[in-house]
Image: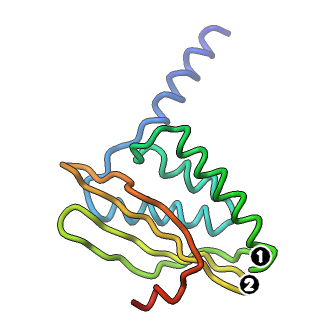
Amino acid sequence: MKNIVIVLSIFFSLSATAEPIKDVGGTKQLCQQAADAFGSGDPKKSMEILKPHWPLPVEEINNLAYQAESQLKMVSSRFGSILGADFVGTKVAGKSFIQHTYIGKFEKHAVRYICVFYKPKEKWVVNAVYWDDQTPALFQ
């Protein structure tokens, strides 16, 4: 029994760490995974995917996940069932910022799902993640 606990502890500690994101392609891949989770109706999983690359306290990320889950439940009654996520585009600001935009598709409406990454030195970290219903901003 003791050996099982040790093996599980090692497994969970290894799975909790993530390889640093060293290129722009890695940021897009990570955001795609998070957007797909969001687009499947699971904003908590979306935040869990981003958590290893997000230099915020775990409690704060968990709180954001809870808020997103609550808000998604509220809007789903007006927006209809969630249908998935689609990639919209990427914007770059200098050498240190990149933003990937997706839409969360519902039966009656869509929401923007945005991941912003920051590169302070050699690796990219999550700087901000948010979603809103400001779809006209997709055309700016």
**Three-letter amino acid code at disc 1?**
Ser
Residue at image coords 38%, 63%: 116
The answer to which of 23 and 60 lies nearer the viewer is 60
Q: Going 53% across and 43% down the picture, which residue do you hit?
A: 60
What x and y, as percent, mark residue 82? 71, 74
Residue name at image x 66 percent, y 50 percent: 66
- Locate residue 115: give its quadrant: bottom left
Q: Please state which of residues 29 and 117 is positioned toward the viewer in this rendering.
A: 117
Q: Residue at x 53, y 60 (%)?
A: 34
- Residues at marks 1 and 2, CA–CA distance in whole angstroms: 6 Å
Circle 1 residues within 10 Å: few <14, some 14–19, many ≥20: some
Task: Indicate left or right for 120 with 13 as reference.
Answer: left
Quarter of the figure with the C terminus: bottom left
User: Could you tell me the amino acid type at mark 2?
Assistant: Glu
Query: Do the numbered discs 1 and 2 sit on residues whose CB atoms are within 8 Å?
Result: yes
Q: Which residue is mark 1?
A: 81
Picture coordinates of residue 43, whole percent (x, y): 63, 58
Residue 126, position in %: x, y? Answer: 39, 54
Which residue in the structure is indicated by mark 2?
Answer: 107
